[in-house]
Image: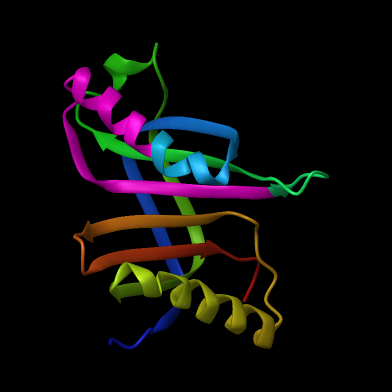
Amino acid sequence: MGKLDLISGKKLVLKKVIIKKLQGIALQELDHEIQKFYQQLKLLNVQIFGPLITRNIGTNIHEDGTISVNYELYTQAHDYQQYAQQFDIRDEIRVENCLYVRFCDSPEYLELAHAKMNVYIYEEDIPVLEDTYTVFVSSNDTQMTVDIFKPVGSL
């Protein structure tokens, strides 16, 4: 098991970005929606570079107890401008002044990286934005590497 080092003041910069917005998606459907996005990119033969990045914008708990999430899926692509009809595109996304944790371990322990960040935010009384950016660097059945960025107010 690795150590989770938390670093403040990190910056996330993405270039040539294709964006898929998921609003009000049932939590249990999120993985399916991510796979649909990847399949759509493959069918369009998009020239992707870099990993998948997700932006968790918020979670909603409804009166009936169901949970829905608002996400944006980002991928970087050399030919991104060709897909302006199918997706939102941006030349660059820049997220300044973030708390950052790199997680390298079994997928079942990923929540520990989020928990460490949340405890730090609580203990240091840091103002944060609701968004969380997750960069899926690599993954297999037994190990994953994920970078987590959480934008903050002033530290």
- The front one of 140 and 11 is 140
Compared across the picture, whether 88 is left or right of 136 comes to right
Q: Which residues are magenta?
A: 34-59
In this view, the residue farthest toward the right is: 63
In depth, the one of 64 and 126 nearer the eye is 64
Q: Quadrant of the C terminus?
A: bottom right
Residue 4 locus on image (x, y percent): 38, 84
- The residue lying toward the viewer, choosing from 80 and 1, is 1
Point out the image quarter for the N terminus: bottom left
Q: Residue at x 21, y 59 (%)?
A: 138
Is residue 72 highlighted in magenta? Answer: no
Q: Residue at x 60, y 66 (%)?
A: 152
- Give the image quarter of residue 39: top left
Give the answer, above or below, for where 122 lies relative to 137: below
Can see residue 63? yes
Say whether residue 17 is visible: no
In this image, 62 relative to 120: left or right? Answer: right
Q: Which color scheme did the rendering employ for the protein?
A: rainbow
Note whether 26 is above or below 36 in the view shown: below
